[in-house]
Amino acid sequence: MQYERDIPSTMSDLDSTTLGQHLAFLRKREEYRRHEIGALPSNRKFSRERAAGEAHITASYLTKVERDEVGQVDVGILRLLASTYCASEDEWRYLCDLAGYAAPYPALAGMGDTVDLPPLEVFQRAVTPIMLTEMSEAVTDLVSFYAPPRRLITANRAYFDAFPTHRSGMYMLEWSFTDDAQEIMINWGDQVLQGVAWHRGLMGRYGRTAWARESHRRLWQFPEFRRLWEARAVSYERPIASQAQLRIRGNDYTMVMENWHMQHDLPITRSRGTLRPLT
């Protein structure tokens, strides 16, 4: 298939962000921000020495943190650095995940911090008669069922009419980087930006699991994914107002989605989308 390219076989071949790397990125970003607002002369850097002084730690310790030469960074120091770098709440949560501190709630509904997932076939066998009935009775709505992280288990005919090249076992974000996706998704740019930011949050929490590493490995084949990944945006929730705009058979639609975690032994998400004419 067109999306199957040469994919690196191990995570060592990919960009696996560390705590030190992300803190160094945030410090550099804060330098640019201060230049823009005039809080730091344009010919001055926001050095480790200056950042350490504002965070009330030593520059030598911050150097070790950025080089990942410290075991587990104290959560209080982590909070001071996040505040010094004007990190968002999602970025603070990401730092906690990278540092090995459990955030107050998991990144994916129904899942713990280090859980691994069974093969896709187990999810496919878990499809119930009620799920099959809903799919068959939904003539116009797009009904689908997903395993983490948005990996398609099965869907109804209306779904495949809208996404004809999406196949069982494929990740929705993976499909988003295909040529077909760019033709169908009118607001493709916004959707993939949000998707990559959400994927970074997921990797912060679950990056040591086999299934998360596999999803990242499959995404790494796409140059555009790698470019967006380098921007280091992170998010744990998709915006409520975020709706995909689709061009299907020459007509433009907004897809209004309803998603929720099912009461099931497996972490299955049920999704139902309604197409409304795009005005």
Image (cartoon, rainbow, N blue to C red):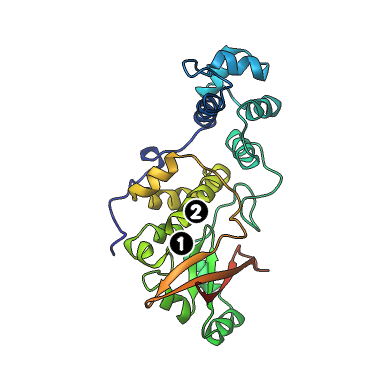
In the rendered view, tell whether residue 154 sits above or below residue 10: below
Where residue 228 sits in the image (x, y, percent)?
42, 45
Viewer-nearest of discs 1 and 2: 2
Relative to the observer, which residue lies in front, 35 or 184? 35
Where residue 277 sits in the image (x, y, percent)?
50, 76
Name the amino acid, label 1: Met
Please state if 258 lies on the left or on the right of 2 as rendered. Answer: right
Name the disc covering residue 79, or none: none
Q: Which residue is mark 1?
A: 172
Name the amino acid, label 2: Gly
At horizontal 53% and vertical 19% (from top left) the residue drawn is: 46
How many labels, in total? 2
Relative to the observer, which residue lies in front, 16 or 118? 16
Where residue 108 sits in the image (x, y, percent)?
61, 55
At horizontal 41% and vertical 42% (from top left) the residue drawn is: 11
Where residue 1 sits in the image (x, y, percent)?
29, 65
Among the two numbered marks 1 and 2 on one chain, the one whose residue lies closer to the N terminus: 1
| CA distance separating discs 1 and 2 | 9 Å
Name the disc covering residue 195, or none: 2
> Is disc 1 placed on a helix, strand or loop?
helix
Callout 1: 10 Å neighbours few (<14), some, many (20+)? some
Callout 2: 10 Å neighbours few (<14), some, many (20+)? many
> Is disc 2 placed on a helix, strand or loop?
helix
Specify the quadrant of the image occupied by residue 127. bottom right
- Residues at discs 1 and 2 in contact (Cβ within 8 Å): yes
In the rendered view, tell whether residue 137 sits above or below residue 149: below
